[in-house]
Amino acid sequence: MAVVSIEELAATLQRGQAIAGLDLGTKTIGISVSDLGRRFATPREVIRRVKFGLDAQALVAMAEKEKILAFVIGLPINMDGSEGPRAQATRAFVRNMEQKTALPFVYWDERLSTVAAERVLIEMDVSRKKRADRIDSAAASFILQGALDRLLSLANAVPPAAAD
């Protein structure tokens, strides 16, 4: 399937369907999965990147196992709002994934998600070595939690009253 907006995703999801958050790195893919009520993002084990075909297989297998209905992928936008090489690489990854799965992808601005994830891990007194192993999935959780919060606000939005 194609890339959709968070609003389009909200219109298609039904109760009891999980979505996954992805933080695409050069060496790993951080993963987070929502609960079925789509309230909480929970980090999962990272996928160690090898080459695209194997990475895609691992991601599709995880989606099938977790019964994922969509992916929210962090888009690394620069602080000035421009897109650099990492954003282009993320878009290329999604274009290639469209050949491997029918699940939709939503781009999510991931600015400062890794910084926020690292701060939380430091506050939890996680050692530097363990932080390195967990940072990508923690960042994926921040990305996914932002999207889940937006989905909740869309679900709770009251449609404007019809004009008389």
Image (cartoon, rainbow, N blue to C red):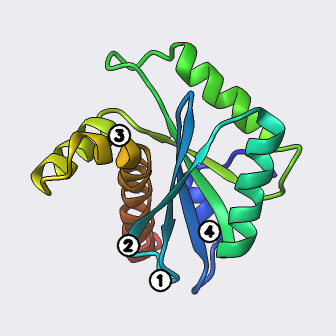
Residue at the (35%, 40%) spot, across then down = 132
Q: Nearer the viewer, mark 2 or mark 3?
A: 3
In the rendered image, which residue does mark 1 sit on? Answer: 37
For the residues labelled 2 and 1, the Cα–Cα distance comes to 8 Å
Residue 132, labelled with which disc?
3
Which amino acid type is marked by label 3? Ala
Q: Residues within 10 Å of mark 1 (few under 14, many from 20)?
A: few
First along the sequence among labels 1 and 3: 1
First along the sequence among labels 4 and 1: 4
Residue at the (81%, 52%) spot, across then down = 1
Which amino acid type is marked by label 2? Phe
Residue 11, labelled with which disc?
4
Q: Nearer the viewer, mark 4 or mark 2?
A: 2
Residue 7, compared with residue 48, is above or below; it is below
First along the sequence among labels 4 and 2: 4
Instruction: Identify the secondary structure beneath mark 2.
Output: loop
Residue 145, compared with residue 95, is above or below; it is below
Residue 127, compared with residue 8, is above or below; it is above
Q: Are marks 2 and 1 in contact (CB under 8 Å)?
A: yes
- Residue 76 horizontal side relative to residue 54, left or right: left
Q: Are marks 4 and 2 in contact (CB under 8 Å)?
A: no
